[in-house]
Image: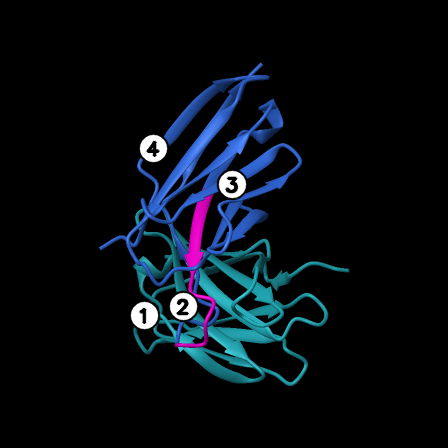
Amino acid sequence: DQQVKQNSPSLSVQEGRISILNCDYTNSMFDYFLWYKKYPAEGPTFLISISSIKDKNEDGRFTVFLNKSAKHLSLHIVPSQPGDSAVYFCAASEMNYGGSQGNLIFGKGTKLSVKP
Amino acid sequence: KAGVTQTPRYLIKTRGQQVTLSCSPISGHRSVSWYQQTPGQGLQFLFEYFSETQRNKGNFPGRFSGRQFSNSRSEMNVSTLELGDSALYLCASSQQGTDTQYFGPGTRLTVL
């Protein structure tokens, strides 16, 4: 049973437009969420995170929105650039020390293609 | 600061052999987590070490084991390799384990 779901395996966007990547989760104990970007044969690169006490976090062109009631988060990239083309993973964890230390639960990823 | 480093980057083994992978975390990070990435299962958590102690373990057989040294460097070992163990093995470090994890480039293991 997938606790973190990225229902769109791929997304294609024109350069300069907004890319919106979505992620849903089922475990209400998750309280820290991260987005990673990954190129083939490389490790994931951390992009941005958000804790459950916030509903928005912004870093340059990247903004993450969290809707706790819907158990949904999204990553907005504005404007999208061809160099953003990669696989994006959503991940979640429990911040407390109740037994989930160092255990990120990942979605299966969304492959973003930004066309020039 | 140097990032997370993993050695070797690529490895080819045959079924039944055993393998040891190494991970050096970012300086000052005390938590090291290991993940397995395969096309079918995505990124799956193996285990996490903090201050030389395994704090958490994923749902993998006992053939997968690890350890952490006093300098926070970590190794993972897979014994009696199976074809299905072919994967990208990723190591991630963080300061406390429950904060942001930073990943290394991974070790690509191929089992023939």
Question: Distance of mark 1 from mark 3, alpha carbons?
Answer: 32 Å
Q: Mark 4, residues whose alpha carbon is within 10 Å: few (<14), some, or many (≥20)?
A: some
- Write down the region rendered in magenta: A89-98
Q: Which residue is mark 2?
A: B46
Is residue A113 left or right of A98 when viewed as pictured? right
- The disc at residue B60 is 1
Tag shown at residue A8: 4
Give the percent coordinates (x, y) of residue B68. 56, 80
What amino acid is labelled 2 in the image? Answer: Leu
The colour applied to the residues of chain B in this rendering is: cyan
In the image: residue A96, left or right of residue A45: left
Q: Are marks 1 and 2 on the same chain?
A: yes
Q: Which chain is blue?
A: A
Location of residue B43 in the rendering, given as x and y in whole percent from the top left corner: 40, 54
Q: Measure the C-alpha gap from mark 4 to mark 2.
A: 26 Å
Tell me the colour scheme of the image. by chain
Q: Neighbour class for label 3 at 10 Å: few (<14), some, many (≥20)?
A: many
Query: Do badges 1 and 4 share one subunit?
Result: no
Amino acid on which disc 1 is placed: Phe
Residue A63 or residue B59, whichever sits in front: A63
Residue under circle 3?
A64
